[in-house]
């Protein structure tokens, strides 16, 4: 098979590039020659990345994972696994060359890369990809370039993002090349457009430097059309998409098209989809104080639709008005599009989040069992639950599981991915102001925001697989200050797992609707976006002088200009989409059944 032969040749070329890097280091060649050898090895990696990431993701992570230590959460000894691979090698070559005393360390890393490549060679011998697999892998590679490559996720210090994108997309072209004769026969004009797009992509990348590269223009004018044309080619050739349920739908032609994401991909089971009736009933309960211990508050008390489902407080008022809760109330818009819930990521599913919040003595101080009994005594609710679960064996009483299910169904209906940026990415060039467009390039480039807040969800759910949600240690101070005295005491993820290396780590939240969700950070330390940007500009807590040995945010200052900060705020405002939410709660019982029939729900991508 032509694709596998090419993959084998590319692996051999990668072997050779790494061997040349080893020779350059071992013989102490000039700094620039060593750097060029490293960059050549990285470009060679990009030629094999498409199939390596698709078929050998564990080995690919070893070869090109972030240069950050990790702790296995089930490791009772809490051993920190030192990072290895190409991104670790980058730290020896950029921004300054390693010291002579570190040469053996560099050679050890090179040897690790060489041994990992053996694993890819062995795996390649057993591959038998189908047409569907190859087109799926090709489109995912385009998405990987858009979300990780161009923003510099795997080239945080070196200038290689643009030429590496060119190599990765050249591999995409080589992967589909065997199918192009068929396309020319079946759809000549599409074949011409696709060939033209590939040439335009390479020309644009070839004439751009990392310092002056217009990332937004590349995404909207080159990468987006490329992924869409690849999907059109697949359809023209009669190659169906996979039927499996994923967060990013297998038939998504673009990351920014309506309905590209499926919230059920993050549900406990994908075999049963939430219905309109379940989402409507969940909305009714969201605004009903029946879930609280004393009937005085509802979910909407702290998650108000007019504030993008936050409450505008640094920390929400606790149950009974006694003090405040531990953390800031996060937005619930697009909360379904992440692998973990809560700031510390302690649960995986919205159903478990619902149960935890209802039972929390400082939040709802309620009981799902008690709420189910109360709902069972109300004839309107009882009938509504029977209707919402009509396909299940009829129950004489409302069940706890059903309460969790309908609330989670409502939360999964709160997908809002039609902000001005999305419209711009779909070709509506007037959707973004010049300032917002400049801010997008700051976000994707100099400010490095997109290396943690990944496109297109702008949260920590890692593309293009969207299978895990990351947590980061930022070093957030107890109080907003240019000279903070202490780190905030909240242990975050480390408090949930008991792992010291994860102390003060918090889930990377979504930046969508960020203009509406002040104050910011897990405890609301910062009141404005300008303050948050300044915090990042200074290098987080460590950059401000705090002792944060496990900070994952680089402590280097970004040196953003006043104009760049202004443009960045403009771009963040362009992530706002609260369409169809309304400003009032549904009508209360006993008029519930007729009121529910009149509720207007916004359908997104064919699902609620």
Image: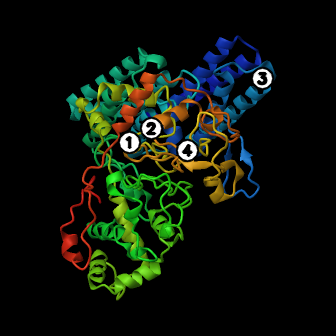
Q: Is residue 276 above or below residue 189?
A: below
**Front of the two marks 3 and 2:** 2
Q: Residue at x 19, y 70 (%)?
A: 597
Label total for image: 4
Quadrant assignment for the C terminus: bottom left
Q: Earlier in the sequence, mark 4 or mark 3?
A: 4
Within 10 Å of disc 1 (Cα), the crowding (few <14, some 14-19, many 20+) is many
Q: Which mark is residue 515?
A: 1
Q: Is residue 27 left or right of residue 239?
A: right
Name the residue that disc number 4 marks: 57
Name the residue that disc number 3 marks: 103
Within 10 Å of disc 3 (Cα), the crowding (few <14, some 14-19, many 20+) is some
Q: Residue at x 18, y 75 (%)?
A: 594
Q: CA distance from mark 2 to mark 1?
A: 8 Å
Q: Earlier in the sequence, mark 2 or mark 4?
A: 4
Q: CA distance from mark 1 to mark 4?
A: 36 Å
Q: Earlier in the sequence, mark 3 or mark 2?
A: 3
Q: CA distance from mark 1 to mark 3?
A: 48 Å
Q: Is residue 34 left or right of residue 141?
A: right
Q: Quadrant of residue 514?
A: top left
Q: Which mark is residue 529?
A: 2
């Amino acid at each position: 098979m032509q694709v596998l032969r090419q993959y084998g040749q590319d692996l051999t070329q990668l072997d050779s590039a790494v061997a040349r890097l080893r020779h350059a280091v071992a013989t102490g060649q000039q700094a620039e020659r060593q750097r060029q050898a490293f960059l050549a090895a990285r470009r060679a990696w990009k030629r094999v990345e498409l199939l390596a990431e698709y078929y050998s993701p564990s080995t690919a992570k070893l070869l090109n994972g972030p240069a950050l230590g990790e702790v296995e959460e089930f490791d009772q000894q809490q051993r920190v696994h030192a990072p290895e691979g190409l991104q670790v090698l980058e730290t020896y070559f950029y921004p300054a060359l390693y010291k002579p005393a570190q040469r053996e360390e560099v050679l050890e890393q090179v040897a690790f890369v060489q041994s990992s490549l053996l694993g890819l060679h062995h795996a390649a011998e057993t591959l038998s990809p189908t047409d569907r697999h190859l087109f799926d892998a090709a489109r995912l590679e385009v998405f990987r370039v858009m979300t990780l490559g161009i923003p510099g996720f795997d080239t945080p210090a070196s200038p290689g993002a643009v030429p590496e994108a060119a190599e990765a997309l050249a591999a995409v072209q080589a992967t589909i090349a065997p199918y192009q004769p068929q396309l020319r026969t079946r759809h000549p004009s599409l074949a011409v457009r696709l060939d033209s797009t590939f040439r335009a992509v390479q020309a644009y990348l070839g004439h751009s430097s990392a310092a002056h590269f217009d990332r937004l223009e590349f995404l909207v004018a080159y990468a987006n059309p490329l992924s869409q044309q690849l999907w059109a080619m697949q359809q023209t050739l009669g190659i169906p998409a996979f039927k499996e349920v994923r967060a990013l739908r297998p038939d998504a032609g673009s990351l920014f098209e309506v309905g590209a994401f499926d919230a059920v991909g993050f549900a406990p089971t994908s075999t049963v989809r939430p219905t309109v009736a379940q989402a409507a009933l969940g909305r009714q309960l969201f605004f009903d104080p029946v879930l609280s211990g004393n009937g005085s508050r509802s979910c909407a008390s702290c998650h108000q639709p007019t504030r993008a489902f936050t409450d505008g407080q640094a920390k929400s008022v606790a149950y009974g008005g006694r003090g405040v809760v531990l953390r800031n109330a996060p937005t619930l818009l697009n909360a379904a599009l992440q692998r973990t819930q809560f700031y510390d990521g302690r649960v995986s599913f919205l159903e478990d989040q619902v149960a935890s919040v209802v039972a929390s003595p400082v939040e709802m101080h309620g009981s799902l069992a008690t709420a189910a009994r109360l709902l069972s005594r109300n004839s309107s609710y009882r009938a509504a639950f029977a209707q919402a679960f009509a396909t299940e064996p009829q129950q004489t009483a409302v069940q706890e599981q059903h309460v969790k299910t309908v609330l989670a169904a409502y939360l999964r209906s709160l997908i809002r991915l039609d902000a001005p940026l999305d419209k711009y990415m779909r070709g509506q060039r007037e959707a973004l102001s010049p300032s917002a467009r400049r801010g997008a390039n700051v976000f994707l480039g100099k400010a490095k925001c997109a290396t943690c807040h990944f496109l297109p969800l702008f949260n920590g759910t890692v593309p293009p697989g969207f299978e895990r949600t990351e947590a980061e240690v930022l070093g957030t101070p107890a109080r907003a200050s240019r000279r903070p005295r202490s780190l905030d005491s909240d242990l975050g993820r480390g408090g949930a797992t008991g792992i010291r290396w994860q102390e003060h780590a918090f889930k990377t939240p979504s930046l969508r609707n960020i203009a509406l969700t002040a104050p910011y950070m897990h405890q609301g330390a910062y009141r404005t976006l300008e303050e948050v940007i300044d915090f990042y500009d200074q290098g987080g807590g460590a950059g401000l002088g705090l002792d944060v040995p496990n900070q994952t945010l680089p402590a280097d200052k970004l040196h953003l200009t006043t104009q760049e900060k202004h443009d960045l705020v403009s771009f963040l405002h362009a992530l706002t989409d609260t369409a169809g939410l309304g400003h009032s709660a549904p009508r209360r019982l006993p008029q519930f059944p007729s009121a529910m029939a009149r509720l207007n729900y916004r359908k997104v991508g064919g699902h609620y």
